[in-house]
Image: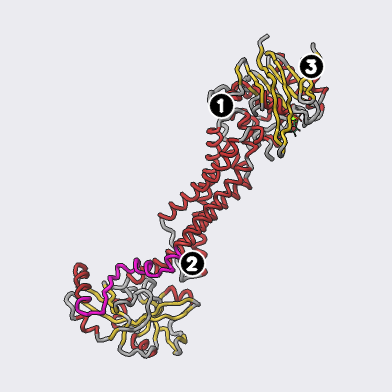
Amino acid sequence: MKQIIEAVDLRKSYVKGREEVPVLKGINLTVEEGEFMAVVGPSGSGKSTLLYLLGALARPTAGKVTIEGKDITSLSERELAQLRRQKIGFVFQRFNLFGALSAYDNLEILSDISRDGTVNREEIKELLAKVGLREKLKFKPRELSMGEEQRLAIARAVVRRPAIILADEPTGNLDWDNAQIVLELFQSLNEAGQTIIMVTHNPQAAAYASRVLRLTDGRLFGQKED
Amino acid sequence: MANLARSNIFHRKARSAISILAVGVGVMLFLVLVGMSEGSLREVAERMMNVDADLMVHSAGWSPVIDQSTPLDMRYKERLQGVPGVDVATPVVIWRLVILRQGQNIFGIDPEYFSRVAGYRKIVAGRELKSGFEMVLDKRLSDAGGFEVGQIIERMGHPFRIVGIAETGVPVRIFIPIQTLQEILHAEGRASFFFIKCTSAQVIPEVAAEIEERFKGLAAFPLGNYYQALSGSFWGLRVFIRSVTAVALVISFLVILLATYTSVLERTREIGILKALGATRAFILREIIAESLAIAACGVILGYALSLLAKAAVELKYPLLTVDITWTRIFLAAGLGVIGGVLGAIYPGMLAVRKDPVVALSYE
Ligand SMILES: Nc1ncnc2c1ncn2[C@@H]1O[C@H](COP(=O)(O)OP(=O)(O)O)[C@@H](O)[C@H]1O
Ligand SMILES: [Mg+2]
């Protein structure tokens, strides 16, 4: 299998007052194309931090991340933006949709951001239908249920066909019924070949993944292999 | 195309309305404050320039715009009329009265020359001056004070009868016969200055030079320069107008700056989302600027409307004040709104786009 993302001795510390608090203390990780990987760990263990480093939303204190063999830690701001447009789809616990835009426009704005016509009208509609929002193209996020909001966020994350989906506690704000719908959506995307890395503190959610790692004390440990 | 800027404006109606209002108030503040000081000055000068005369002849060192005294002998009239090129010379005594809680210049004039001094403005009620304790008011003052022909008003210790109301545009708002004013001031045979009408416009400079040559101690001042003299001679007034302009500019600018600044600051989180989606700094700044430009443009237009309302309100409440809204200042106000709006957006916008997306995303 092709290796799609790799972290080598990845470290991240936050400065709190005068102290430097290490959160990630040397993470080594390899994710292969088509994997659905989950990272579990208690809250505050650094799961979000790890995901942000993998998705080029923050820079590590030390170590490196490569995506499709390319070291991203030394990229310029412009190259990072390009990487986020072309390779990565983010799903957040708090959805982070554009409140002013309709469901449809929340996806279409990606064409403006990318300026390359990767997203077309039909694909958007098809995708929104797939996540159960066929009837709600014109709805604003606040007119959707939380489960619908998260499905919209997932549609937004996949519409540009990124190499990797990074999901940060995607079910954290959902009841279990809605969480299951979201997790099944991830599963079906994964079955179609989508690489997914999901962090969660919920072991039930992690069970949907094909591989689960545990983040404890700033390091990653394998949990189960299948 | 998903228009984020437009959608945001409509989505956050209250926020947008407040920003637009803030810009509008800034624009209005500028237009009305400056328009009021400049307009009232211009109105005074224009009325003086309506007089059918070419020169004001006065004592050298006596200011035709601020002094009220009678340094000249009336007998200069004949001697001035003897100067080649002089058609008419008529004496004026200028004095000040408080009417409607506001100081007003009054002219004591030779009733024979009333219509010339009045710039041939019509008498809209009553008649011209004749003699004795009579007054002619201008329409604006009589409207403002509700004065009527036949009414007696007590001024300078004497009862004056209002005999006529002149159309607005006459040089002062109150006229009385020169002899009456001289008697009240114990200045019989004296005048403040003379209005001179020349035989033709071409000879004005020669006549002025000749008068100053023949009568040492007299100065001949072209009436056409009155506005410059007025705005130039009141050092305090000029400073006042400049200060008002500067203060209005700065306050309006700050208000506008603050309005867009806070609205962009509130959007830090959204900027984080855009960055996470791979938007470039240029894209994000363009969105922010587009939005604040739209807000600023609406605000400027609202400001124009508010200015017109404020102008009407001021002129209704204080009928003797004039608010001038000139094209120059209209353009300046638009610049003020747009530049303030865009700068106010760029600064927090730059701060936000420089942040790591994660930091921007965690902004509450
Ligand atoms: N921007 C930041 N500045 C300082 N400390 C931070 C910052 N982000 C996270 N932390 C700290 O790093 C630790 C890990 O945070 P996070 O990655 O959000 O954990 P998790 O997602 O597992 O709950 C926490 O102790 C948190 O307080
Ligand atoms: Mg987290």
Q: Tell me which segment is drawn in magenta.
A: B212-241
Q: Which residue is mark 3?
A: A222
The subunit carrying tag 3 is: A
Q: CA distance from mark 3 to mark 1?
A: 33 Å
Q: Are marks 3 and 2 on the same chain?
A: no
Which residue is painted at 40% across and 54% down in the image?
A: B328
Chain that bears disc 1:
A
- Which residue has dot 2 on it? B315
- Disc 1 marks which residue? A76
- In the image, taking residue B215 as reference, residue A102 lies left or right, namely right
Q: Quadrant of ligand 2?
A: top right
Residue A10 lies left or right of residue B100; in this view the side is right
Residue B250 is tagged as: none
Could you tell me the amino acid type at mark 1?
Ser
Of B223 and A226, nearer the camera is A226
Which-is-in-front pick, marks 2 and 1?
Answer: 1
Label 2 sits on what residue type?
Glu
What residue is rendered at 26% in x and 78% in y? B218
Relative to B195, does residue B39 appear above or below in the rendering? above
Relative to B3, is B135 above or below? below
Question: Could you tell me which secondary element the residue under label 3 belongs to?
Answer: strand
User: Which residue sits at x=71%, y=33%?
Assistant: A20
**Magenta region, mostly helix, strand or loop?**
helix
Q: Position of residue B85 (x, y in %)?
A: 18, 74
Left or right of B2: which side holds A191?
Answer: right
